[in-house]
Image (spheres, rainbow, N blue to C red):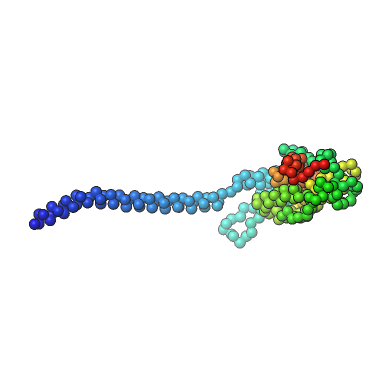
Amino acid sequence: MKWAIVITLLVLAVLTAPVGWYFAQSLSRTDDAQKIAALEAQLAIQAQKSKDLTIDLNALASRVTLLEETGVAEPVIQSFADPAEERTDSLADSFAQVVLIADRREVNKGLSNSGSSYLKNLFGLPRPDLSEACQSMTNPLLKDLVKTESVGPIRVTMIEPAILSLRQVFRNVKIFEPELYERINTAGSLCVRHIRGRPGSVSTHAYGLSVDLNIDGKLDTLGDGKTQLGLILLADFFNKEGWYWGASFGREDSMHFQVSKEKINQWLRQGLIRTK
């Protein structure tokens, strides 16, 4: 009887051994899967931390280049051991600093000046009786497009496509240069008159296609080949949106930004403006 019991137990052990091995292996695989899942979760956390700490090296390089070219002092580096002291950004503190414009004749790469002759051929005069005083727009192709709206840091009076485009410029400035954005001021936009001293010439201001800007309310000096550091930074944002910078005029006017020929031609193709 005892031998029967022993033999029965041995048979059961032999028969159940594969099941036990399979079960043990399953547990092992489950543990491995759990370990892999935990590792993947940890890697995802570390990847997000790395992403959060990523520096825009291109933007940093541009700011360093400006510091070097304009002679602005290097930023103050503060030790983390004293968090009570306020950090300073010498570039932000120098937005209103007046500096030379390097290669100012080449600053409008890929864009063309929408001058007086070009605009008169497209639209005619903004009004027939132009003088040296600012007046209202009467040109039927443009007058209904003239609006006064906020474009972010300033309010302007311009034709509607220019307002929409200018709003995009400042939207980008706010994202990438928020300190500069807060210090932008305007010296005017729409002014329907001929250029002072040149009765036959009409400014882009008279068509609602340009705006004059400055930093901290300090106006740029006309024709001295210099400008505020903040305007040099702004010029890149305007160029990408298709605006022409007055720094390259024969008589430098670096506070002046106007819609380029290329941008106007784009609006014509899109049906946003009409010609005579």
Q: How many marks?
A: 0
Nearer-the-camera pick, 28 or 59: 28
Quarter of the figure with residue 114? top right
Residue drawn where x is 87% and y is 47% of the image: 127
Residue extending furthest toward the left: 1
Nearer-the-camera pick, 66 or 215: 215
x, y percentage for residue 77? 62, 53
x, y percentage for residue 153? 73, 55
Nearer-the-camera pick, 47 or 9: 9
Q: Quadrant of the N terminus?
A: bottom left
Residue drawn where x is 78% and y is 55% of the image: 148
Q: Quadrant of the C terminus?
A: top right
Q: Above or below — where is 251 with respect to 32?
A: above
Report if residue 180 is visible in the image.
Answer: no
Residue drawn where x is 56% and y is 49% of the image: 54
Residue drawn where x is 48% and y is 51% of the image: 44
Task: Give left or right: position of 85 versus 38.
Answer: right
x, y percentage for residue 105? 77, 38
Residue extending furthest toward the bottom: 84
Report if residue 169 is visible in the image.
Answer: yes
Task: Give left or right: position of 123 versus 93.
Answer: right
Task: Give left or right: position of 79 versus 261.
Answer: left
